[in-house]
Amino acid sequence: MRELLFTDFSGSSAGKVYNWAGKTILIAEDTDCSFLYLKTILRNTSATILWASTGQEAINLVREHREIDIVLMDINMPGISGFEATVGIHSIRPELPVIAQTAYVHDNEVELCFSSGCIDYIPKPIDKNMLLEKLGKFLGAGVPKAAAKEAPGH
C-alpha cells in the first residue's frame, strides 16, 4: 500500500497553537481522502480523533463514546444523510455540538443544517484556519504561537 502524503500544516495556522489534549472529535466523513485531510489539519492539536464513514456509524459512535466533545458532520453521507444523522445524534446527546461540512452551500442547505440541529457549518473545500477557529469556539481558543513558545514545556 502506498503511503499518502499530505501537506504539513503545522507552520501555517494563522499564528495560533491549539491544544485540545483530552478532547475527542468525531469526524463523520465518507471519503477517506477527506477524512485524512481533516485528520492532518488536526494532528498538532493533541485531540483524539474518531472516524465514522456513514451516518449510522456516527450515531453508533456517539452512543458508545460519551467522551466525544464535538462532531464534524459531512452532509452528503451514504445511507443516512448528515442531516438525519445529526437528528439521531441529538436524540442521544442533545447538547453535543455538530458542525456541518458540505460542498453544496445553497441557501436551503444551510437552513437545513441549522434546522437539523447543527450549530454551524463549514463549506468545502475546508479552509484550515476557519476549521480551527470554529472548533476553538467549543474546544478552547488557540494561543498565539509566540506565547506558546514562551510557556513552560515548550
Image: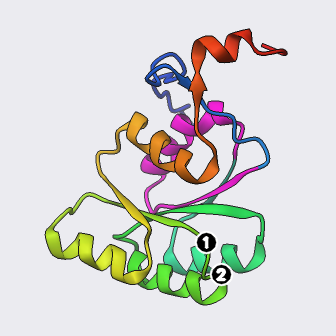
Residue 1 pos. (x, y %): 57, 38
Residue 30 pos. (x, y %): 45, 63
Task: Write the residue at 56% across / 63% down.
Answer: 71
For the C terminus, the quadrant is top right
Residue 81 seen in render: no
Task: Write the residue at 68% across / 73% down.
Answer: 61
Cβ–Cβ under 8 Å for marks 2 and 1: yes
Task: Write the residue at 68% across / 18% down.
Answer: 148
- Magenta-tinted stretch: 23-47
- 120 and 3: which one is in front? 120
Report the Cα–Cα distance between label 2 and label 1: 6 Å
Image: 150 above or below 77: above
Q: Secondary structure at mark 1?
A: loop
Residue found farthest to the right: 153
Q: Is residue 59 left or right of residue 124?
A: right
Check disc 2 and report the residue beneath it. Answer: 93
Residue 10 pos. (x, y %): 54, 21
Q: Is residue 151 left or right of residue 111?
A: right
Image: 46 above or below 9: below
Characterize the local packing of mark 1: few (<14), some (14-19) or many (20 or more) Cα atoms within 10 angstroms. Answer: some
Check disc 1 and report the residue beneath it. Answer: 96
Characterize the local packing of mark 2: few (<14), some (14-19) or many (20 or more) Cα atoms within 10 angstroms. Answer: some
Q: Amino acid at mark 2?
A: Arg
Residue 74 pos. (x, y %): 41, 64
